[in-house]
Amino acid sequence: MVFWLISVPPLETSREATWAILKDRLFSGRNDYSLGYRFELPEGMKVGTLDGLVSLSDSLVKIDNFVDSVVKKVEKQFVDIDPNAELKCQNKNGDYVNVETYLTTFEWDESRYPYRSKGLQELTEMVQEQVTKMDDDIRAKSQQHNDLKSSLQSAQRKQAGNLLQRDLVEVLTGKVVAPGDFIETEHLSTVVCVVPKTQEREFLSAYEKLEPGNVVPRSAKKFAVEDREGNSVWRVVLFKKAAESFKAKARENKFSARDFTYDPTAAETVIGQRSQLENDVHRSWTSLMRTCKASFSESFIAWTHLKAIRVFCESVLRFGLPVNFVSVLLKPHPRSNKKIKESLFSLYAHINKSGITANTVLEADENEADYYPYVFFEMDVERS
């Protein structure tokens, strides 16, 4: 959804008469090229000096691009975390409306941008500062949320997969481990092995020989746990000095010796930590959602007011003083851009000093707008 913001000098003695002519030439029954709306700017905006306007005009290009990029970034973040997110703006009455309604019923919000007490440069700086802060806030909250999600995913991965991969803390619990199953003394230690179902007999005949004289005979014990692939968990008691060597030789023989220390309270601790992470992720998601909703509204409002400042600034530079122009929001119908341009160039041929014609450029382009006999800006809100 693309809108055009244009500004033209009066064709007749009044702005209303000019508006009537524009309606007839651009969005009447016989010339139905676009939807059109008045884009009213407040009376009494501070003009400042000519040098100030020229300098501001140059700065506004970069600031406009920056604010537009933040609006897109906030929207993408909003939709990424909630594909059903409603992209709305809060109007002057405090109601949330979609962006098209906000644009087509735009009214300058003096409570946000007090044009009577501040000049155009100050208003522009206000917009830039506000949007920069929103950008920083969104980035910080997004990073916090992503960090928490990564921690939770890491915790969940530990409980995924088969017994060869998953963390054994929640596998070897008090429900399957009997007192005395895990022996840890000054000299003795317990090693855990994961054994495929097809290799259980081989394991039982081989484990004592992996470290002869260091493995407690007949100490292999199978726990009552098994994964879908038939892998099972066994413990072996041996002298502590031979534990690492035993693990290495077990792996060489396709018996997966796992690094594991039994703690009867560990499972409860891990479950509690994961539950806390789940709660933290949900809270951060909720907080990020609220921030995105508010930031999208505020950044889009800021962007629209910045466009209004650009229209005012360029109109004064183009048409001079006293301030007297008509600003209009257009929503062109498909394949009607050229017709709109032809109509506007025809209406304002008398002030067209550039020599450019409506046929010179088939599509409207802000890069060519300096040569138009009217002020032109584009607002691409198709993403919204």
Image (tube, helix red, strand yellow):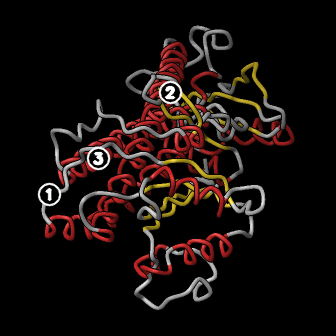
In this view, the residue farthest toward the right is 198
Q: Secondary structure at mark 1?
A: loop
Above or below, comparing residue 197 to residue 381 in the picture: above
Q: Is residue 122 visible?
A: yes
First of labels 1, 2 by sequence position:
1
Q: Residue at 65%, 58% (x, y): give it.
A: 24
Residue ID for mark 1: 48
Q: Which mark is residue 208?
A: none
Q: Nearer the viewer, residue 155 or 146?
A: 146
Q: Nearer the viewer, mark 3 or mark 2?
A: 3
Amino acid type, label 1: Gly
Amino acid type, label 2: Val
Q: Secondary structure at mark 3?
A: helix
Q: Residue at 74%, 64% (x, y): give it.
A: 334
First of labels 3, 2 by sequence position:
3
| Image quadrant in which you'd find residue 209 | top right
Q: Which mark is residue 281?
A: 2
Q: Nearer the viewer, residue 147 or 176?
A: 147
Amino acid type, label 3: Val
Q: Nearer the viewer, mark 3 or mark 1?
A: 1
Q: CA distance from mark 1 to mark 2?
A: 50 Å
Q: Residues within 10 Å of mark 3 (few under 14, many from 20)?
A: many
Q: CA distance from mark 3 to mark 2?
A: 32 Å
Residue ID for mark 3: 127
